[in-house]
Amino acid sequence: MISDYIFQLVDVLLLLALFIDAPWAIRGNSHCQRGNPAVIRPHSVAITEFGAVGDGVTLNTKAFQNAIFYLNSFADKGGAKLFVPAGQWLTGSFDLISHLTLWLDKDAIILGSTNSDDWPVIDSLPSYGRGRELPGRRHKSLIYGRNLTDVIITGDNGTIDGQGSIWWNRFRNETLDYTRPHLVELMNTTGVVISNLTFLNSPFWTIHPVYCSQVIVQNVTILAPLDSPNTDGIDPDSSDDVCIEDCYISTGDDIIAIKSGWDEYGTSYDRPSKNITIRGLVGQTNSAGIAIGSEMSGGVSEVHAENLTFYNSSTGIRIKTSPGRGGYVRNIYISNMSLTDVKTAIRFTGQYGDHPDESYDPKALPLIERITIDDVTGQNIKYAGLLEGLEGDTFLDICLSNINLSVTSKSPWTCSYIQGYSEAVSPEICEPLRETIIPDHYSGCYYPSHHVQSSSTETEVPDCHGKLMVA
């Protein structure tokens, strides 16, 4: 499995090198600054001190568990660091602790076991009511943490490989007993930094912070085959104050998917995803570059995304929901997006997805409002937009501006149960959005508090503290 990805990693490096001279290239300016992956822990051990063998064959689950158990004694003494040196370290699931840095050296590879027995079964999430794929429980992620504070997963671009093909095949063959595991899941955790690593072949969603606060995901590469099922890149779920920056992601499902619980369970748990910043994101997918939903019953708001580049993908931006979801998606601002060879630039789907059980309320309609998408260019786009709200539940205050797409379809826009405004959109926007934003409807559109209406190419944007800078 590792050898299969050598050439793909080389391709990624060459691709990123080509980006350097492009006008939408990721620059090196870091704005996710709440955490410091280089924080010095006063205590440090190597995984080899606990009997681990990095030959890619020896199972090292006990070594990881014992090392972390030992380091837990330093949690109240400034924390500790677990160093993973060069080698291939096969392991099953293991739990992290508070005030821990898990550090992977440059040539270190943590390999997920291909034996499902090494991925324990745990309770379903309360905001989902069951496993996402099957009723009942679910497999624990390879790297897992719950009720923690101050967790750092980083290194010198080491690799975490879930070896997910066995799980993808079981999904396709319908032989799963429980919902597939994520690669990394942190639950009820505050102060998370995940940076400077490569993640490969997740069995299911790759990085899943759920019920978390103060999360940074920065300078990571996430890869899985484009036909791998449900291998989302990063899925903030019922989490707040999340910053995702300078990442390259190529997977079989949404590059970023923002979620907040499923139907009546998400409504009852009532923890929204909010204050999410996404910046400097490049990738390709068979699904969407950035998706919101379809599990959004706890609500999603204050999402700001900018400097986005998606290519060879199904969709650029997508909002997915359904009758029975309830909840809301509002105050979303997306700007400076470049698309190439993308089927649909912008897609809203009001009838999407399944339900956890028969107890959902079909009259629980989602509220979708105040969505602004600004400064979008696209080449070889089939459809500019498929914007489909719900009968009796119109999506409101949808604002599109400064959009220039080269579209191959003779019917570039399809719109139903949508209300909003537009400015400088090509090809010509659909009728429900033809009222102009300026001068009468600017206040009806959502813009971050820093936004200044101006024709200047210099715009003030917030960093991940909310401080203003010039971009």
Image (spheres, grey):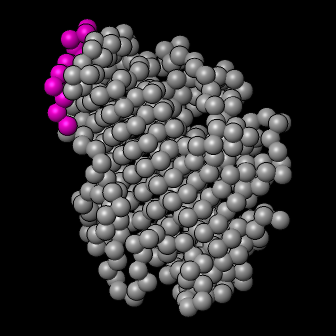
Q: Where is residue 266 in the image (x, y as percent from the top left)?
A: 66, 41
Residue depicted at x 33% and y 57%: 465
Describe residue 354's horizontal placement relative to residue 68 as left or right: right
Describe residue 147's horizontal placement relative to residue 434 as left or right: left
Residue closer to the observer: 459 or 214: 214
Q: Which residue appears farthest toward the bottom when viewing the image?
A: 439
Q: Where is residue 291 in the image (x, y as percent from the top left)?
A: 57, 55
Residue 272 seen by the camera: yes
On the rendered image, what quadrant is the N terminus found in?
top left
Residue depicted at x 73% and y 48%: 325
Describe residue 275's horizontal placement relative to residue 40 as left or right: right
Compared with 466, 119 (above or below) is above
Q: Is residue 142 magenta?
A: no
Q: Start and end of the magenta stretch?
A: 39-54
Residue depicted at x 32% and y 80%: 458
Q: Position of residue 189 (x, y in %)?
A: 43, 34
Residue depicted at x 61% and y 22%: 123
In the picture, residue 400 is in which quadrant?
bottom right
Q: Where is residue 192 in the image (x, y as percent from the top left)?
A: 36, 38
